[in-house]
Amino acid sequence: MPHRVNTVYLDNQTTTRPSDLVLSQMLPFFTDHWGVPSAPHKKGQELIPFIHEYLQPIFNLFRAPEGVKFLLAHSGADAIEKVLLSSFFDVTFPTGKNQLLAPVGSDRIVRRMQRHLEDLGSLPKLIPIGSHGVVETKDFIEAVSPRTALVTFSWVNGKTGVVQPLKDIQKICQERGILLHLDVTHGLGKLLYDWGEIGADIVTFSGDHLHGPKGSGGILLRSDLKCSLHTEQGNFNCAALAGLAQALKEADEAMDYMCLEVARLRDKLEAGILESCPDVKVLFDKEERAPHLSAMTFPKADPEALLYALHRQGVFASADEAALTFGLSRFSTDSEVERAIAIVTQAYRQLSLVSGGLV
């Protein structure tokens, strides 16, 4: 498909455009400061002050207390994979606890790792999602057992935008000595994350969902947590850390804008589509949601067919077997939303006529 100037990018739940400042922060580590900090000479040692400087915006965004540890990952998926593997070797091997709990509909990397760890003797178990789009406390209590080693959750569902309440879950995990891993990729920079209030043991995130560099992610560990994640990771990627730090700094500064202006644009998108297509349904619109995400069902059109029709006209979103997800960003504009409303409603009406509602 040829390049389109007037495209509307509403797939920010999949990845985001790196900001200009992120790119400018990274460039010196390709041209000037290209050493590795493990080297004993000046070319390597000159990087150490940069590393200390770039860690601070990360801790600031998480409101993390002194002592919380940070590890740079190659992506959000890499971060999750490292956490699940380390829990198996650090908890399952020495204690025999081999149950890994995750909600139904978890990220693909979680499902894949569950299958891999099952081959090694782990017992994966999926927790059902309730009618409000989150794991209910009663279902969580029924799922945990004396053999539970790790519970892994997404703070925000990347398809629906629904925010998972964590207070009861965190309390149960703490009381029973179960590790709680939280992936905050889809909520970070959109909702306030307070380390002391939420209280997860391990937190992961992907940098490319925050207008940061591709191939970057992070792992934060509770200060007293001892695990095999504390290992050398080869040549440290200072360029990725520089870009990631800038992205998190910008996300922290733009959080109010996301919660107010981007939420207004998301609501405008939903209202405009519903006004023209009253049979469309916004999923979980009465629940607490991240301000930038909207999942909609279009009952008279196949989601993949509708997604393709939108793609042909320059509106980019994502879909699963039941719904389309639209993800806005701080770069989204009123004119883009208005264009998206017009194209979505036109495409849906055309597909409705073709299908006759038989989908």
Image (tube, grey):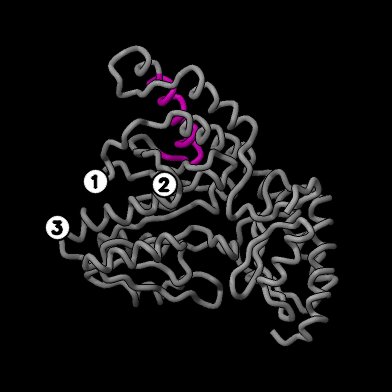
Looking at the image, tell me whether mark 1 or mark 2 is earlier in sequence order.
Answer: 2
What number is the disc on residue 94?
Answer: 3
What number is the disc on residue 196?
Answer: 2
Q: Secondary structure at mark 2?
A: helix
Residue 190 location in percent, x, y?
60, 49
Question: 163 or 273: nearer the eye?
Answer: 273
Point out the frontmost of discs 1 and 2.
1
The residue depicted at 15 percent of the width and 61 percent of the height is 95
First to last magenta residue range: 47-64
Look at the image and tell me in which quarter the C terminus lies.
bottom right
Q: Residues within 10 Å of mark 2 (few under 14, many from 20)?
A: few
Tell me which corner region of the image, top left, top right, bottom left or bottom right, holds residue 256.
top right
Q: Residue furthest top?
A: 42
The residue depicted at 48 percent of the width and 74 percent of the height is 129
Looking at the image, tell me whether mark 1 or mark 3 is earlier in sequence order.
Answer: 3
Residue 46 location in percent, x, y?
39, 16
Question: 5 or 289: nearer the eye?
Answer: 5
Q: Residues within 10 Å of mark 1 (few under 14, many from 20)?
A: few
* Residue 36 covered by magenta stretch: no
Tell me which corner region of the image, top left, top right, bottom left or bottom right, holds residue 280.
bottom right
Q: Amino acid at mark 2?
A: Gly
Residue 90 location in percent, x, y?
21, 53
Q: Is residue 352 above or below residue 168?
A: below
Are circles 1 and 2 on residues that touch, CB within 8 Å?
no
Mark 1–mark 2 Cα distance, whole angstroms, equals 24 Å
Residue 273 location in percent, x, y?
80, 67
